[in-house]
Image (tube, rainbow, N blue to C red):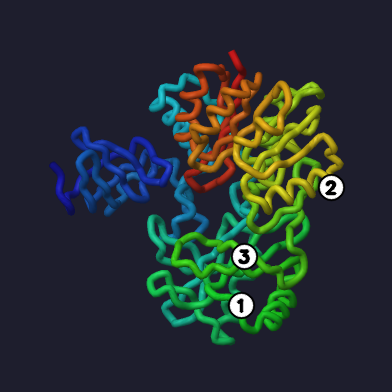
Amino acid sequence: MFAKDQIFTVRIDDMNNEGNGVCRVDGTVFFVIGAVTGDVCKVKVIKTAKNYCVAVIIELIEPSPNRVQPLCGYKRCGGCSFKNITPEHELQIKRRIVEGAFLRAGVDIPVAEVTSVGDGTRYRNKAQFPVGVDKNGHVSFGYYAQHSHDVVFCEDCIIADPEFPRIARTVCDFADSHGITAYSEKTGKGLLRHVCMRSGTGGILLVIVVNGKKLPYSDELISAVTSAHSRVCGITLNFNEENTNVIYGKKYVSIYGKETLRDDLCGRRFEISPASFYQVNHDCCEALYKKAAELLDLKGSEVVVDLYCGVGTVGLCAARGTGRLIGVEIVPEAVENARINARLNEANNAEFLCGDSSVIKNAVNGKVDAIIVDPPRKGLSDEVIDAIFDIAPDKLLYISCDPDTLARDLKKLLGSYTADTAYPFNMFPKTGHVECVTLMTRK
């Protein structure tokens, strides 16, 4: 039995997706905060549980060759769990994360090497900065500390578009000088909740989330932002008066410029609304969609259904050569974007429906050759899996952002389908997340 403040000398054997080193002491798993695979270090226990302990490094005796000096100096931000390891080791870990998820679920599919694009910095085309009051009493912005809603105030982020924190600083300075208060989750008071941005070919779309029905001095704010940041192509207010940690409320009002953001992807043009899902890493997304198209290997006459289609990106890119494309999405704004995107790209074979999987049966007359699914982290519901079994497509392409739910769903699907290989993509460098694409073929 272990106790807090006990000290041990350990060698780190592995890392988990939260960036903690993993080792064993007398058979008990230790998670060591900040440790890297191959480190030899002296650690102190800070938490004990029935099957594991959490520890911190008190002396780094022999640094691992996998260890690097982080490019970012913010220690408490919960964003980059792999900022202190080499890119090569990050890819090794992420492949093992997928393999481990499959092993635990009893799924016997080979996992390819992880595909990565770029150097892992400045790739994020989206940021959502919570707002708070810093130690000097000023309205400021940052990210939430890991496993908390405490704001870590930061003036830059090495994985985000460099213009994002500059715009957030302009908004927060404006709020300070005009008496606009920062929202507090503890009290439920304060007006300015989040400063959110998304960048693309057409510029930067700024969304300001407020705890109220209006934002005072909005005309002056528009002038302050647009005069300092020429890439801002649109400013939208979002109203969220709920006592919740959900970022966006239901109501959006455009107060300047464009209501949607343009981005070009895989030779296609897309218009994206603030509420719509869109991949945060443009270049890696292109690589993933090209692999998806390669795996689908469409001949030109197939009927393809794209579930969780969002603004239509997967279907319009990966299934562009199909005979008929039917996209299904539950977010109305995204469906409207998808219909516009189909027209922009002259995809006359594409139609987009608002609803869940139940709308497919009414929309499709006859055989479906392939279904594409790109669900949220929770994966596929039993209702969606049942609908897939009922439709019985020859091919099922699964794009996943969570290896555990992917493995769980594959276990259910592989009774009727076979799969050759899972292909991981490093969509989120320096973090513990990994994207996968897997093709299943009906037995």
Between the C-alphas of marks 3 and 1, the distance is: 11 Å
Residue type at tag 1: Lys
**N-terminal label among 3 and 1:** 1
Q: How many labels does the image show?
A: 3
Residue at the extreme left: 1
Q: Which mark is residue 158?
A: none
> What residue do we see at 56% from left, 34% from top?
436
Q: Mark 1 falls on what kind of element?
A: loop
Q: Where is residue 371 in the image (x, y as percent from the top left)?
A: 65, 28
- The secondary structure type at the circle numbered 2 is helix
Q: Is mark 3 on a helix, strand or loop?
A: strand
Q: Quadrant of residue 238?
A: bottom right
Q: Do the CB atoms of the residues marked 3 and 1 lie less than 8 Å apart?
A: no
- In-image side of 102 versus 336 (left or right): left
Mark 3 residue type? Lys
Position of the N terminus by quadrant:
top left
Dot 1, how many residues are within 10 Å of its Cα: few (below 14), some (14-19), or many (20+)?
A: few
Q: Is residue 47 above or below residue 409?
A: below
Q: In which quarter of the image is the C terminus?
A: top right
Name the kind of residue labelled 2 in the image: Leu
Marking on residue 251: 3
- Taking depth in this image into account, of 159 and 442 the one nearest to the observer is 442
Task: Using the numbered discs, state the Cα–Cα distance from disc 2 to disc 1 in whole angstroms.
Answer: 34 Å
Q: Residue at x 71, y 43 (%)?
A: 312
- Bin the neighbour count of mark 2 within 10 Å (Cα to Cα): few under 14, some 14-19, many 20 and up: few
**Circle 1 sits on which residue?**
214
Residue 234 pos. (x, y %): 73, 67
Query: Which mark is nearer the camera, 2 or 1?
Result: 1
Q: Residue at x 15, y 49 (%)?
A: 3
Question: Where does residue 319 sit, x and y in percent of width and height?
Answer: 74, 32
User: How many residues crowd around disc 3 within 10 Å: few (fewer than 14), some, or many (20 or more)?
Assistant: few
